[in-house]
Amino acid sequence: MPSLYLLWDESHLWGLLAVRAVKAMNLPHRLVRGREIAAGLLEQEPCAMLLVPGGNARHKAEALGPEGIAAVRAYVAGGGQYLGFCGGAGLALTWSGKVEGLGLCPWKRAGFDERMQHFMSGHLHMALPAAPSPLVPENFGPAPLLPVWWPGRFESFPHADITVLATYEKPGEDFWLADLPIADLPEGTFSAWQDLYGFSPTPTFLTHQPCLVHGRYGKGAYTLSYSHLETPASPEANAWLAHILRVQAGLAPACDRLPAWNLENGSAAWDDAALAEVHGWLEDVLRTGTAHGLLFCRNDWLMGWRTGIPGAGLNNLRSALYAVRAQQPSPRAEAFLRRHREKLLRAADLFHTGCVQYLLAERLAVTLAKSLPDAVPPAILKGQREALFGPPMQAGGAYRELMEPLDELAFLQMAD
């Protein structure tokens, strides 16, 4: 029986990172869907831990539905263990509306005073609790470096059942705010901007705020982290992930460090003409964005993007297609592609044509912004962007038509 369940729905790139981590650690695991949990999987076949990767928390809740949400609560209340990264952490918080969160943790998600504050990526130094916790590795120094990729924030308050394991401190050398590399700025830049413009993008709003917490729910427990501990080749993050899996879930990870993940150097083990054509179209989109300064290489597995460009969706497509082609096809993946080949090609063709045109329009708008600011009306750019990617945080348009079959193929490749 698998010891670790990983909730796949609405995880995309972050689900791939989590699967890659548990495979590198040689842990018995199973990828599960929200509908399986809603149908009683956790009660019928209990696991040592439910791991929920990053992604959109609201969409994850929708995938679980009311029955799935109730099932996760019952699983943890009965003694189960929950580990959530970023969106998976947000899912476990208390919130309501058309859909509701799991409510394992009584905290809510905090908002941001400025939208710019959400555009954070890279490593941050953390402060550890003064009182020792069994979930904090004993060999850590006083300020471990942990990666954050556009995290949310906890709306925290003291609670007897919640232990803060790490709080944000100062940025590391690879820290960016949107497309602004903090380490490359001369000393005193933030102060000068504050004096001149009354605004500074310095991430001090995070300082001393909780990043990683642990709490009890009924007989079970949860650990929630806005740091992506499954980030490739991030030594202290990976060691902390392995430690949590050992201490909280009783698992036995085979390693404490995850290998690097280079999406540029991987060869295609699944040599399929349709997938190769989709890959060529997507690469043309990425080349266009990179050539015109709208996209850039953030690291070996992640593209960065200028503010306003829908780079998260492009990263999801890129990583899914890489994961699909990187290994020999599973029987279920081959059968799915046979049924959906023409639909996939049509979706990829439409997305390629529309996205190249959109990126060139964005580039033209940047060029003319000073001299002819109204030459490319923002409303037209917004319409193009939403036709391609849907409204913000919605995942629609041509992107969704392409992402859905690629995500299913990635699931079938990773699950078999």
Image (cartoon, rainbow, N blue to C red):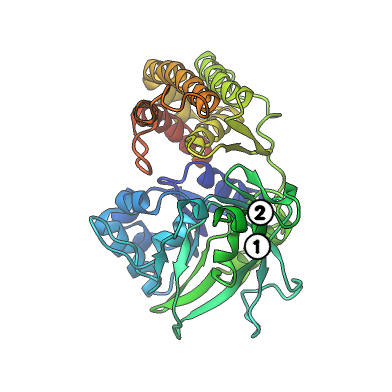
Q: Is 399 left, or right, of 28 in this rendering? A: left
Circle 1 residue: 242
Viewer-side residue, 310 vs 335:
310
Residue 369 x, y percent position in the rendering: 50, 29
Relative image position of residue 366 (x, y in whole percent) = 53, 28
Residue lying at 65% horizontally and 62% vertically, measured from the top left = 242
Image disc number at residue 25? 2
The three-letter code of the residue at mark 2 reads Met
Q: Mark 2 or mark 1: which is in front?
A: 1
At x 59% / y 72%, what residue is drawn? Answer: 208
Asked if residue 252 can be seen in this view, the reply is no
Instruction: Name which quarter of the figure residue 124 lies in.
Output: bottom right
Image marks 2 and 1: residues in contact by CB distance under 8 Å: yes
For the question of whether residue 281 can be seen, the reply is yes
Which amino acid, by three-letter code, is at mark 1? Answer: Ala
Indicate the quadrant where residue 187 lies: bottom right
| Mark 2 crowdedness (10 Å alpha carbons): few <14, some 14-19, many ≥20 | some
